[in-house]
Image: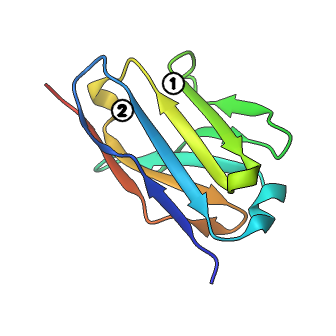
Amino acid sequence: QVQLVESGGGLVQPGGSLRLSCAASASRFRIYAMGWHRQAPGNQREMVATITPGGSTNYADSVKGRFTISRDNAKNTVYLQMNSLKPEDTAVYYCCGGQYWGQGTQVTVSS
């Protein structure tokens, strides 16, 4: 069974940092573009960042300069480094690749 498993969420103060990880259960994810999306209560799910198999990246305007997506194909893992976090970054963050989605990890930014 193909799985994407996120980890690394939690509670952080404004201005703090977190690194999310997404571990894929199958090596074929190496050929997929991978992405992070997020959904806050009452809002639609939105794209945060994507990365192609070759490493090209794309970011939502709201996170440019603060978040960095990367991948380690040898480990079948995608990361999202989040710096200078703001309360409006609070959401459930989901990893995706191909037609697969992870279960999500909660990120809460609050003092």
Query: Around disc 2, counting alpha carbons within 10 Å, would you say few (fewer than 14), some (14 to 19), or many (20 or more)?
Result: many
Residue placed at 55% from the left, 54% from the top?
Answer: 22
Residue 4, placed above or below residue 40:
below
Kindly indicate the quadrant of the structure image that contains residue 82. Answer: top left
Amino acid type for the residue under numbered disc 2: Asp
Q: Check the picture and name the quadrant holding the C terminus.
A: top left
Residue sitting at x 30%, y 16%: 15
Q: Which label was assigned to residue 26?
A: none
Residue 65 screen position, x and y as percent: 56, 15
Write down the residue under mark 2.
89
Q: Nearer the viewer, residue 61 or 5?
A: 5
Q: Mark 1 highlights which residue?
A: 63
Q: Is 19 or 98 nearer to us in this picture? A: 19
Residue drawn where x is 70% and y is 45% of the image: 72
- Secondary structure category for the residue under label 2: helix
Few, some or many residues within 10 Å of mark 1 (<14, 14–19, 20+): some
**Residue in the foreground of this view, choosing between 12 and 64:** 12
The percent coordinates of residue 96 (x first, y second) are 61, 57
Dot 1: element: loop
Residue 61 image-quadrant placement? top right
What x and y, as percent, mark residue 60?
58, 30
Q: Earlier in the sequence, mark 2 or mark 1?
A: 1
**Pointer 2 with pointer 1, Cβ within 8 A:** yes
Determine whether, in the image, residue 43 is placed left or right of residue 99. Answer: left
Q: In this view, does 76 lie above or below 111?
A: below
Where's residue 41, x and y in %?
28, 50
Q: Name the amino acid, label 1.
A: Val
Q: Which residue lies furthest to the left in this view?
A: 111
